[in-house]
Amino acid sequence: MTLPNKIGIIKAAIAKKEKVLVAFSGGVDSSTLAALAFAALGDNALAVTLYSPMIPQSELEYAKRTAEVIGIKHIVLDHDILSDERIRINDPQRCYYCKKQFVKKLKGVASEEGLNVIMEGTNASEITGRRPGLEALREAGSSIFTPYVDFDVSKREVRQMASYLGLDVANRPSNSCLLSRLPYGTEVTSDLLGKIETAEDLIHSLGISSVRVRVHDDIARIEVQPVDIPIIIQNRMPILSCLKEMGYPYVTLDLEGFRSGSMDEVL
């Protein structure tokens, strides 16, 4: 099936929903979904971003700009995710509890706005392996519509769709919530997440697009793509200064390099 044909099928499926809420983070999956929803339904599509300390401020600002470019109506709601103790202690099932809260909050918004369904951007490349958040989505039943899963759209195809639609986000590296920087069982605070965000912002400013600063008690472990390791070495002093001022006496560079979900390797 050609890309335009698959896009047409998804738009037709969205149109049948008549009025939709798009769970919108500003990443490539949700941005492409928002663009398709807006193309299919216009003002009957609403993008909603739930903002909490686990989302970097830079990601929120990018989401706002992307929604404006797409043209879709967009609202941002504060979401006190750390009020749930199971998430605050970074339980290994935290993604399940987080997604349950996420669905509950968005269901309330959809009801208030008279919208029929919540559209969510999980893609077909993300339905294998350890995915506790996906279980929560499945439990939500028909209130959640996941077009990429339903129509077998991979991450690669989502990026192709974004490029086809002219979205700048097409080649933007994927990001994940800041809780993924912490070992399971670590108590999460807004201050701790803020430190991680500041450190990653500094490294991003060096021209490195994919970075994770993982925190293990008093150790900050930096993950970047192997090709970017020389940039970290060349800028070691400002990075060290930043992290030591935050209270991390030990700063390490992970020689294995950047990889998603590295905190799951110990499970």
Image (cartoon, rainbow, N blue to C red):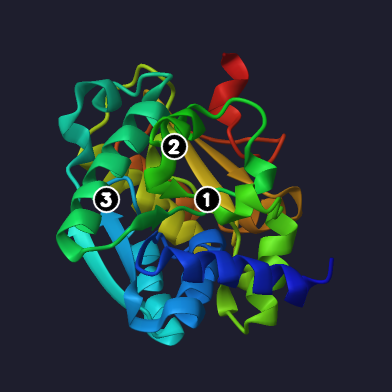
Judged left or right of residue 128, residue 141 is left
**Label 2 sits on what residue type?**
Leu
Q: Quadrant of residue 140?
A: top left
- Per the rendering, the mark at residue 137 is 2
The kind of secondary structure element at disc 2 is helix
In the displayed orientation, state which residue is furthest to the right: 1
Q: Is residue 144 above or below residue 18?
A: above
> Disc number at residue 146?
1
Under mark 1, the amino acid is Thr
**Could you classify mark 2 by the number of other residues whose Cα lies within 10 Å: few (under 14), some (14-19), or many (20 or more)?**
many
Residue 85 occupies which quadrant of the picture? Answer: top left
Q: Is the residue 68 above or below the residue 64 in the image?
A: below
* Sooner in the amino-acid sequence: mark 1 or mark 2: 2
Q: Residue at x 56, y 64 (%)?
A: 13
* Mark 3 closeness class: few <14, some 14–19, many ≥20 residues within 10 Å: many
Contact between labelled residues 2 and 1, with CB atoms less than 8 Å apart: yes
Marks 2 and 3 sit apart, C-alpha to C-alpha, by 12 Å
**Residue depicted at 67% across the width and 46% down the height:** 124
| Spatial separation of the CA atoms under disc 1 and disc 2 | 9 Å
Q: Is residue 37 above or below residue 99?
A: below
Tags 2 and 3 touching, CB below 8 Å: no
Query: Depth check: 44 or 189 in front?
Result: 44
Mark pair 3, 1: CA separation = 14 Å
Residue placed at 33% from the left, 81% from the top?
Answer: 43
Mark before the other along the chain sequence, 2 or 3: 3
Image location (x, y in percent) of residue 87: 29, 27
Camera-side residue of 129 and 153: 153
Q: Residue 106, labelled with which disc?
A: 3
Q: Is residue 76 above or below residue 230?
A: below
